[in-house]
Amino acid sequence: MSSNNLTHAPSRGAYMAAKAAGVQFEVEIVDLFKKEQLKESFLKKNLQHCVPTLEDDGFVLWESRAIASYLVDKYAKDDKFYPKDLQRRAVVNQRLYFDCATFYPRIRAICYPILWLGETEIKESLKKELNISFGHLDQFLGETKWAAGDHPTIADTSLFASVSSILEVGWDISSYPNVQRWVEQCASLPGADENSEGAKMFGAAVRKNLK
Ligand SMILES: N[C@@H](CCC(=O)N[C@@H](CS)C(=O)NCC(=O)O)C(=O)O
């Protein structure tokens, strides 16, 4: 198995945010399946050796959601994807932290052992935990059209990257009608096609190892 950088949800989240910011950029592939992140040249830039890692005119930054907010703040023509209004921004941040600290780690807890540690089944307890988070996401999306209001933001690009990964593993979201509606809407996000392509590669890699 080899990958491009967009196989992994954090990279896809940052990629869609960069597209939303409207900035010109190049994607450099660091193939995790070939351990390329451990090369000396990459470690010099990012001691945590994770993707995505941004280089912007000599400035290096990692953590996909930090990259997303930096790019939109710096390059977007307006603040729609990351509002400057304090409370609207706070809600976007809340959703981003929800994704970073709760939702995506639950997806990772399912997929990482299957991809890298020889697991062939998904534990019931992990299924249950992720579905609790899907329930919360469904409630957020019952209150607003997008994850953090009536316009797409970097909360959507980040959460959609996470959701796309687990959907491609075959997750059943039929109990979450607001999530289903939002997933359809997300096809209109900038970079959604590339996200979908990367998520398919990710899903195939996980499914290949499942019993
Ligand atoms: N919270 C980080 C997670 C980054 C992360 O864990 N990336 C993984 C791929 S999903 C990675 O680079 N793993 C390789 C490694 O850490 O050596 C983010 O959102 O950017």
Image: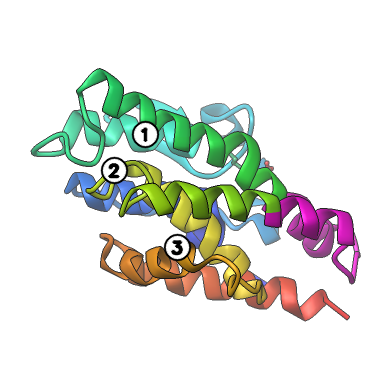
Identify the image quadrant of the N terminus. bottom right
How busy is the neighbourhood of tag 3: few (under 14 within 10 Å), some, or many (20 plus)? many
Instruction: Name the residue at 71% across, 48% down.
Output: 106
- The quadrant of the picture showing ligand 1 is top right
Instruction: Name the residue at 78% across, 63% down.
Output: 115
Which numbered marker is on residue 92?
Answer: 1
Q: Is residue 78 depicted above or below 156 in this figure?
A: above
Type of colouring = rainbow
Instruction: Name the residue at 26% across, 18% down.
Output: 86
Identify the image quadrant of the C terminus. bottom right
Hey, what amino acid is under mark 3? Asn
Q: Badge 3 is on which residue?
A: 178
Tag 2 and tag 1, C-beta contact below 8 Å = yes
Camera-side mark, 2 or 1: 2
Hey, what amino acid is under mark 2? Gly
Measured as percent of width and height from the top left, residue 203 is found at 63, 73
Q: Report if residue 114 lies within the magenta region.
A: yes
Hey, what amino acid is under mark 1? Val
Q: Is residue 74 depicted above or below 194 in this figure?
A: above
Q: Badge 2 is on which residue?
A: 149
Measured as percent of width and height from the top left, residue 56 is found at 30, 32
